[in-house]
Amino acid sequence: MQDITIAAIQMNARLGEVERNLDSIERWARQAAAAGAELVCFPELCISGHWCAGEVWSVAEPVPEGPSCRRLGKLARELGIYLSVGLAELQAGIAYNTQVIIGPTGVIGKQRKLHMSADEYFHFRTGTRIPVLDIGKCRLGIGICYDNIFPEVARIAAVKGAEVYLMPHAARIGAWPQTTGEQQQVVATNKKLWAKVYAARAYDNGMYVVVCNQAGPAGEEPPTNHGGGIMVFDPTGELIAESRTRVIEEEMVVCRLQAELFAQRRKASCFNLQTRRPEIYGELTKPTD
């Protein structure tokens, strides 16, 4: 790993409004590049919207040859940056909830969501692979929203060489909070959970963790609202950057990830990736009663 500056964006992605969402992604990407970011991290399904209805197929598109990947590939090439973006991917008539890494040379790779939450199961098929993607300055693993509740996913990425782990979210909050106090409670509740769970993912695996969530009301049919939130944890599990707004609105956070801290954590005495014993973990692969 080398030092790398990342930007994480909490943005509102309207359901099915692909061109509008791409315009927003481009605007934020240009701001991030101007601020020195080399990798810009956007939320889950930020292109298509977090669509859990039959119409998801109407906005799904292939990767890497779809129009959104082509447009963002040109943007990444112009700005000399890498983008992490989420969309409904279409392959052989099937939709997947997919996060794509796009760089100056085009699509680097993708992660399909592995675990569907609630009604997502009826609209997306699940992925089956946990790739690690090399963008030069670091190797990326990706866990999409609900995937991050399962420690096995992040651990596999770490074992396969991930140094920075991206956690794009479109975490829904139910009815839109009408008052400032209600919005503050939603933001605080999200971050309290993430500080408890995702700090452990960073600490256990000795890697940087970057969390970013959709923020705002995405559409009325079906009603879909997201609570925002950005958090960055270092390889010791310490929170090193976060969104500052206490209400639900768009925001960008820029943070420098330091290679030396990563190296120190991985070289620490008795660091668990060095002392793990996979030969005795077979119970994890057996179905429960």
Image (cartoon, rainbow, N blue to C red):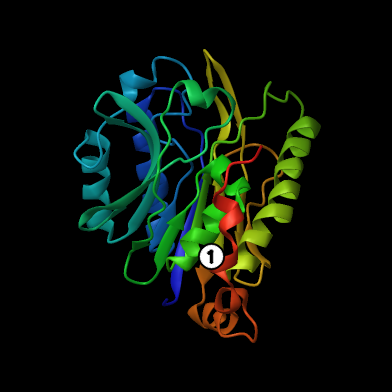
Relative to 224, say whether 25 is above or below.
below
Relative to 206, say whether 126 is above or below.
above
Whether residue 99 can be seen here: yes
Which quadrant is the N terminus positioned in? bottom left
Direction from residue 63 to residue 10 in the image, left or right: right
Number of numbered labels in the structure image: 1
Where's residue 93, x and y in %?
A: 27, 23
Query: Which residue is at the front of the view, 88 or 250?
Result: 88
Q: Which residue bears the numbered disc 1?
A: 255
Residue at the (61%, 64%) spot, across then down: 202
Where's residue 122, x and y in %?
A: 48, 20
How would you rate the neighbour count of disc 1 (Cα within 10 Å): few for under 14, some for 14-19, many for 20 or more?
some
Residue at the (32%, 60%) spot, across then down: 81
Where's residue 79, x and y in %?
A: 28, 57
Kind of residue at badge 1: Cys
Where's residue 5, x and y in %?
A: 45, 67
Q: Quadrant of residue 277?
A: bottom right
Relative to 91, say whether 139 is above or below.
below
Direction from residue 289 to residue 134 in the image, left or right: left
Query: Which residue is at the front of the view, 67 or 60?
Result: 60
Which quadrant is the C terminus positioned in? top right
Q: Quadrant of residue 113?
A: top left
Q: Quadrant of residue 105?
A: bottom left
Residue at the (53%, 65%) spot, across then down: 255
Whether residue 101 can be seen here: no
Secondary element type, mark 1: strand
